[in-house]
Image: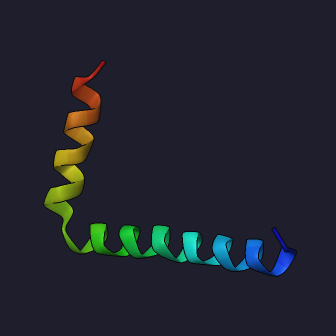
Amino acid sequence: MRDGLKRFLLGIAIAAVLAVVFVAYLRPSFMFDLANRILLCF
């Protein structure tokens, strides 16, 4: 793959992760539930 395409895909991936984090902060109950599910695995 060309460097330009790699950089573009990396930028899209980073933007998607940031969007998910932003939406998660808008719903604190979701983050609390997710944290509890992760902790219950141990």
| Residue 37 left/right relative to 5 | left
What colouring style does the render use?
rainbow
| Residue 8 lies in quadrant | bottom right
Return the residue nearer the eye: 11 or 42. 11
**Residue plotted at (37% across, 69% down):** 20
**Residue plotted at (20% across, 37% down):** 36
Give x and y (percent) for residue 26: 23, 75
* Total residue callouts: 0
**Residue plotted at (23% across, 46% down):** 34
Rendered view: 12 above or below 17: below
Return the residue nearer the eye: 5 or 26. 5
Q: Residue furthest top?
A: 42
| Residue 21 lies in quadrant | bottom left
Give x and y (percent) for residue 32: 20, 50
Q: Quadrant of the C terminus?
A: top left
**Residue plotted at (14% across, 58% down):** 29
Rendered view: 31 above or below 40: below
| Residue 29 left/right relative to 16 | left
Give x and y (percent) for residue 22: 36, 75
Give x and y (percent) for residue 39: 27, 29
Return the residue nearer the eye: 17 or 33. 17
Q: Quadrant of the N terminus?
A: bottom right
Q: Residue furthest right?
A: 3
